[in-house]
């Protein structure tokens, strides 16, 4: 008899592919199917691919559905739809829309008697958890979140819309002098410019005026105008050879005082070769927790703040207490 | 009407004093009394001090008792005794005795209809949480725990028992070359010697033979024989001026692979001016969680693995989702 937790994947982009890889690292999880909008024969996956139109036929064959669609277009529609039929985990990451998305998911999941854990990843996700833990333990203090060195998709897309740009990638990089100051225990108020640099690698269109392109990028409001931005022009070959990976990382750090002379510092740091594969690994661990909490009677929507860390592991709690505590 | 969570402190050593300070940082918590074995008039505290013999008279006046006794002598006896009458939080830290202590606390708390959260601190505690989280997200990897630079009480006590030693303190320090290697993503198997240095500051007795004292320290089995140990002889004045603080810290780090070419690294780091005050700060946040989980119906013994991070904060979950996620 098969006692594995049966997992489905909805959407097969970078994140969905990462989830498929991650599931293979867990012997108590089993991939039932990948649900895609593309014709299944056009999807090059290891696992079984099924048209998303058939997803509801899998209601009794999937314990947890991992939703790998985008937060802007896909999840607001897919999330509540699938939460009525399945336990779900997703990485919804539009910060300002989280309360609204949570409410929709909560209603849908309750209606179906299911559990939906939303906004799982590293930010929102593990970084949120660190921010909350740190502030709870050291209420008299100040937290900072630094991102990078890593690729920001949003900023890369913004550059690509500048006339004269053929291809581009943007790396967000913490300002080293600021990081040093914070790690030494200072708690200043920082402007965006003091906190991160923005480094752009741009393949220009043939004949483009490079000064104009550079200036257009550096003055994009919201994305670059408030930062020190560096633009490097490179060839298509250099781009293909050096800038197609998706490294990322960063850290949450808090310095707090427990009395007038004692400072205490907490830091949670990530250094990632592949941003989507790491996010996928978090989703898969939380899929296990979702299954278990649902089995224990939990219904509706939850976030990373609600899930006990003990429920992420396949190891029984008594053994965890003995071996890891 | 007073809606604060009513907290009691049992034991008023370094940890108990830290808890008293920490409670003052939380406006939703109120210190009811400090319970001490010493005559109350001999205890120099800000808060009300009561003889521990009267503790059971406070059954309806305290929501959570924070047990600040030692793990070797006090908690094995006090823990189960008070868990029958109160919700409790403690920092029981004898790793090998945790299963046994958990069982005793679970039985006592259930009998009294209470909740007891045990082994709360930073190791065991937050470091345990990091080890479990990291291993759950990156099952194909290797974790390391480094302690220090910080004072090890156990090693300091061991030195003080060497003939010719008047006063002593021992600092545990991670080996810098090893740390560098691990942060670069290596996953070697390390001996104790490769992982930590032991630095001792010793005030010798007048007339003691320093070579003999140094050699006796360096060869103490279990404590120093397996490490590179440095012994510095200092004066009583130097000791008083430079070595009476209780700094500590360290980090849990894991490098894992999500596929053959992508490595991912997670790290949780602490840098503490005062070890007991930081441990106290964690205990106080978990006292709030204990109160809430008990109110929600949870009974028996629990550990840091069972407590959702959201329950540590005084801020309502809806607001946390909006502001911190």
Image (cartoon, coloured by chain):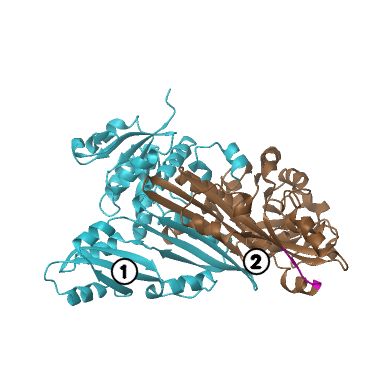
Chain colours: A cyan, B brown
Q: Residue at x 37, y 58 (%)?
A: A248
Q: Secondary structure at mark 1?
A: strand
- Chain ID, mark 2: B
| Magenta residues, start to end | B231-236
Task: Find residue A301 and report its horizontal and vertical position in percent.
Answer: 41, 46
Residue furthest to the right: B207
Q: Quadrant of residue A10?
A: top left
Task: Find residue A278 and report its horizontal and vertical position in percent.
Answer: 39, 50
Residue placed most toward the observer, B236 or A174: B236
Q: Please tell me whether mark 1 or mark 2 is closer to you in this view.
A: 1
Quadrant holding the N terminus of chain A: top left
| C-alpha separation, residue under disc 1 versus residue under disc 2 | 45 Å
Rendered view: A322 above or below B128: above
Residue placed most toward the observer, B202 or A247: B202
Dot label at residue A133: none
Q: Secondary structure at mark 2?
A: loop
Residue furthest to the left: A207
Looking at the image, can residue A320 be seen?
yes
Q: Is residue A283 magenta?
A: no
Q: Residue at x 87, y 68 (%)?
A: B206
Task: Find residue A208 and report its horizontal and vertical position in percent.
Answer: 13, 71
Task: Find residue A244 and report its horizontal and vertical position in percent.
Answer: 27, 56
Q: Residue at x 71, y 56 (%)?
A: B8
Looking at the image, can residue A308 be seen?
no
Residue placed most toward the observer, B174 or A50: B174
Dot label at residue B24: 2
Q: Quadrant of residue B212?
A: bottom right
A200 displayed left or right of B92: left
Residue furthest to the top: A1
A161 displayed left or right of B95: left
Q: Which residue is mark 1?
A: A199
């Amino acid at each position: 008899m098969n006692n594995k937790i049966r997992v489905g994947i909805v959407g097969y982009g970078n994140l969905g592919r990462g989830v498929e890889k991650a599931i293979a690292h867990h012997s108590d999880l089993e991939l039932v199917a990948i649900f895609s909008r593309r014709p299944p024969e056009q999807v090059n996956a290891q696992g079984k691919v099924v048209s998303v139109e058939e997803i509801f036929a899998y209601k009794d064959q999937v314990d947890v559905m991992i939703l790998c669609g985008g937060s802007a277009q896909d999840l607001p529609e897919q999330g509540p739809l699938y939460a009525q039929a399945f336990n779900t985990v997703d990485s919804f990451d539009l910060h300002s829309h989280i309360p609204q998305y949570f409410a929709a998911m909560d209603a849908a999941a309750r209606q179906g008697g299911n559990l939906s854990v939303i906004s799982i990843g590293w930010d929102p996700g593990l970084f949120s958890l660190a921010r909350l833990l740190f502030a709870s333990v050291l209420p008299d203090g100040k937290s900072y979140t630094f991102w990078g060195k890593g690729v920001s998709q949003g900023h890369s897309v913004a550059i690509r819309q500048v006339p004269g740009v053929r291809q581009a990638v943007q790396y967000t990089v913490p300002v080293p002098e600021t990081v040093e100051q914070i790690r030494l225990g200072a708690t200043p108020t920082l402007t965006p410019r003091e906190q991160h640099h923005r480094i752009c690698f741009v393949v220009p269109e043939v004949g483009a005026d490079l000064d104009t392109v550079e200036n257009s990028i550096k003055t994009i409001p919201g994305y670059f105008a408030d930062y020190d931005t560096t633009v490097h022009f490179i060839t298509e070959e250099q781009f293909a050879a050096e800038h197609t990976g998706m490294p990322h990382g960063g850290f949450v750090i808090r310095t707090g005082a427990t009395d007038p002379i004692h400072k205490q510092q907490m830091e949670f740091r990530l250094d990632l070769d592949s941003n989507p594969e790491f996010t996928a690994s978090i989703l898969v661990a939380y899929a296990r927790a979702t299954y278990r909490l649902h089995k224990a009677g939990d219904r509706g929507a939850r976030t990373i703040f609600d899930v006990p860390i003990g429920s992420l592991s396949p190891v029984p709690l008594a053994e965890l207490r003995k071996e890891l505590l």
